[in-house]
Image (cartoon, rainbow, N blue to C red):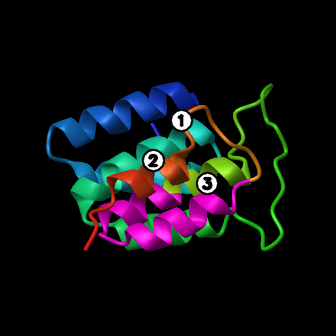
Amino acid sequence: MEDGHPLALEFHSRLLARHGRDDEAFRLLRPHVQDRFIAAALVDVADGAGRDDEAAELLAAQIPDEHRCDSPWCCRGLDPDMAIGLLATIRERQGRVDDAIALLRTRDKTSLNNSAASYAQRRPRP
Protein backbone atom coordinates (compact mmCIF):
# COMPACT_ATOMS: atom_id res chain seq x y z
CA MET A 1 0.00 0.00 0.00
CA GLU A 2 2.96 2.35 0.52
CA ASP A 3 3.32 3.06 -3.20
CA GLY A 4 -0.39 3.34 -4.02
CA HIS A 5 -2.47 6.34 -4.99
CA PRO A 6 -2.31 9.06 -2.31
CA LEU A 7 -6.07 9.03 -1.73
CA ALA A 8 -6.04 5.24 -1.32
CA LEU A 9 -3.11 5.55 1.08
CA GLU A 10 -4.97 8.18 3.11
CA PHE A 11 -8.14 6.06 3.22
CA HIS A 12 -6.22 2.90 4.13
CA SER A 13 -4.33 4.66 6.92
CA ARG A 14 -7.48 6.19 8.39
CA LEU A 15 -9.11 2.75 8.28
CA LEU A 16 -6.15 1.26 10.15
CA ALA A 17 -6.37 4.03 12.75
CA ARG A 18 -10.11 3.47 13.27
CA HIS A 19 -9.28 -0.13 14.14
CA GLY A 20 -6.63 0.70 16.71
CA ARG A 21 -3.64 0.38 14.40
CA ASP A 22 -2.58 4.02 14.71
CA ASP A 23 1.14 3.33 14.79
CA GLU A 24 0.98 1.33 11.56
CA ALA A 25 -1.08 4.08 9.95
CA PHE A 26 1.45 6.70 11.03
CA ARG A 27 4.33 4.68 9.56
CA LEU A 28 2.50 4.40 6.23
CA LEU A 29 1.81 8.14 6.04
CA ARG A 30 5.14 9.48 7.32
CA PRO A 31 7.13 9.17 4.04
CA HIS A 32 4.43 11.09 2.13
CA VAL A 33 4.05 14.15 4.36
CA GLN A 34 4.65 16.50 1.39
CA ASP A 35 1.12 15.70 0.19
CA ARG A 36 -1.34 18.03 1.92
CA PHE A 37 -4.06 15.41 2.35
CA ILE A 38 -1.58 12.86 3.69
CA ALA A 39 -0.18 15.50 6.06
CA ALA A 40 -3.67 16.20 7.43
CA ALA A 41 -4.27 12.46 7.94
CA LEU A 42 -0.86 12.15 9.60
CA VAL A 43 -1.83 14.81 12.15
CA ASP A 44 -5.07 12.95 12.88
CA VAL A 45 -3.46 9.54 13.39
CA ALA A 46 -0.48 10.96 15.30
CA ASP A 47 -2.78 11.67 18.23
CA GLY A 48 -3.88 8.05 18.60
CA ALA A 49 -0.36 6.77 17.97
CA GLY A 50 1.12 9.07 20.62
CA ARG A 51 3.45 10.54 18.00
CA ASP A 52 2.56 14.23 18.04
CA ASP A 53 6.18 15.23 18.59
CA GLU A 54 7.35 13.27 15.55
CA ALA A 55 4.51 14.65 13.41
CA ALA A 56 5.40 18.17 14.58
CA GLU A 57 9.02 17.64 13.51
CA LEU A 58 7.94 16.41 10.08
CA LEU A 59 5.66 19.41 9.59
CA ALA A 60 8.19 21.92 10.91
CA ALA A 61 10.67 20.61 8.32
CA GLN A 62 8.18 21.64 5.61
CA ILE A 63 8.15 25.29 6.78
CA PRO A 64 11.09 27.38 5.53
CA ASP A 65 12.38 30.13 7.82
CA GLU A 66 11.08 32.81 5.46
CA HIS A 67 7.98 31.11 4.17
CA ARG A 68 5.69 32.37 1.49
CA CYS A 69 2.48 31.00 0.09
CA ASP A 70 3.12 29.08 -3.12
CA SER A 71 -0.62 28.66 -3.76
CA PRO A 72 -0.67 24.98 -4.71
CA TRP A 73 -4.27 25.15 -5.91
CA CYS A 74 -3.53 22.94 -8.91
CA CYS A 75 -1.51 20.30 -7.08
CA ARG A 76 -1.53 18.28 -3.91
CA GLY A 77 1.64 19.79 -2.46
CA LEU A 78 1.84 20.78 1.19
CA ASP A 79 2.36 24.53 1.19
CA PRO A 80 4.03 26.17 4.19
CA ASP A 81 0.84 27.86 5.38
CA MET A 82 -1.03 24.56 5.57
CA ALA A 83 1.94 22.98 7.38
CA ILE A 84 1.76 25.84 9.90
CA GLY A 85 -1.96 25.24 10.43
CA LEU A 86 -1.44 21.51 10.97
CA LEU A 87 1.47 22.16 13.33
CA ALA A 88 -0.75 24.60 15.26
CA THR A 89 -3.34 21.83 15.60
CA ILE A 90 -0.72 19.59 17.20
CA ARG A 91 0.48 22.38 19.51
CA GLU A 92 -3.10 23.02 20.67
CA ARG A 93 -3.63 19.30 21.29
CA GLN A 94 -0.44 19.33 23.40
CA GLY A 95 -1.87 22.18 25.49
CA ARG A 96 0.52 24.71 23.95
CA VAL A 97 -2.16 27.18 22.86
CA ASP A 98 0.15 30.22 22.96
CA ASP A 99 2.52 28.45 20.57
CA ALA A 100 -0.41 27.56 18.30
CA ILE A 101 -1.56 31.17 18.19
CA ALA A 102 1.96 32.43 17.51
CA LEU A 103 2.32 29.96 14.64
CA LEU A 104 -0.98 30.97 13.10
CA ARG A 105 0.02 34.62 13.18
CA THR A 106 2.99 33.82 10.92
CA ARG A 107 0.79 32.57 8.10
CA ASP A 108 0.79 34.48 4.83
CA LYS A 109 -2.88 34.01 4.17
CA THR A 110 -5.93 34.42 6.33
CA SER A 111 -9.18 32.53 6.38
CA LEU A 112 -12.74 33.61 6.83
CA ASN A 113 -12.78 32.42 10.43
CA ASN A 114 -9.37 33.95 11.25
CA SER A 115 -7.86 30.95 13.03
CA ALA A 116 -5.55 32.91 15.33
CA ALA A 117 -8.43 35.01 16.62
CA SER A 118 -10.51 31.86 16.99
CA TYR A 119 -7.83 30.24 19.18
CA ALA A 120 -7.48 33.42 21.21
CA GLN A 121 -11.22 33.56 21.87
CA ARG A 122 -11.38 29.93 23.00
CA ARG A 123 -8.42 30.29 25.31
CA PRO A 124 -9.42 30.40 28.98
CA ARG A 125 -8.78 33.71 30.69
CA PRO A 126 -7.16 33.91 34.14
Residue 57, placed above or below residue 89: below
Check disc 3 and report its element: helix, strand or loop.
helix
Asked whether disc 2 touches disc 1, contact meaning CB atoms under 8 Å apart, the reply is yes
In the picture, residue 58 is in which quadrant? Answer: bottom right
Q: Amino acid at mark 1?
A: Asn
Near-viewer residue (40 or 95): 95
How far apart, in angstroms, are the residues tagged by discs 3 and 2? 18 Å
Check disc 1 and report its element: helix, strand or loop.
loop
**Crowd class of label 3 (few under 14; some 14 to 19; many from 20; radius 10 Å):** many
In the picture, residue 13 is in which quadrant? Answer: top left
Extreme front residue here? 126
Asked whether disc 3 touches disc 1, contact meaning CB atoms under 8 Å apart, the reply is no
* Range covered by the magenta-colored residues: 87-107
Check disc 2 and report its element: helix, strand or loop.
helix
Residue under numbered circle 3: 83
Screen quadrant of the N terminus: top left
Q: Amino acid at mark 2?
A: Ser
| Residue found at x 72% / y 48% | 79
**Crowd class of label 2 (few under 14; some 14 to 19; many from 20; radius 10 Å):** few
Residue 8, placed above or below residue 120: above
Residue under numbered circle 2: 118
Magenta segment's dominant SS is helix
How far apart, in angstroms, are the residues tagged by discs 3 and 1? 18 Å
Q: Position of residue 123 (x, y in %)?
A: 33, 60
Residue under numbered circle 1: 113
How far apart, in angstroms, are the residues tagged by discs 2 and 1? 7 Å
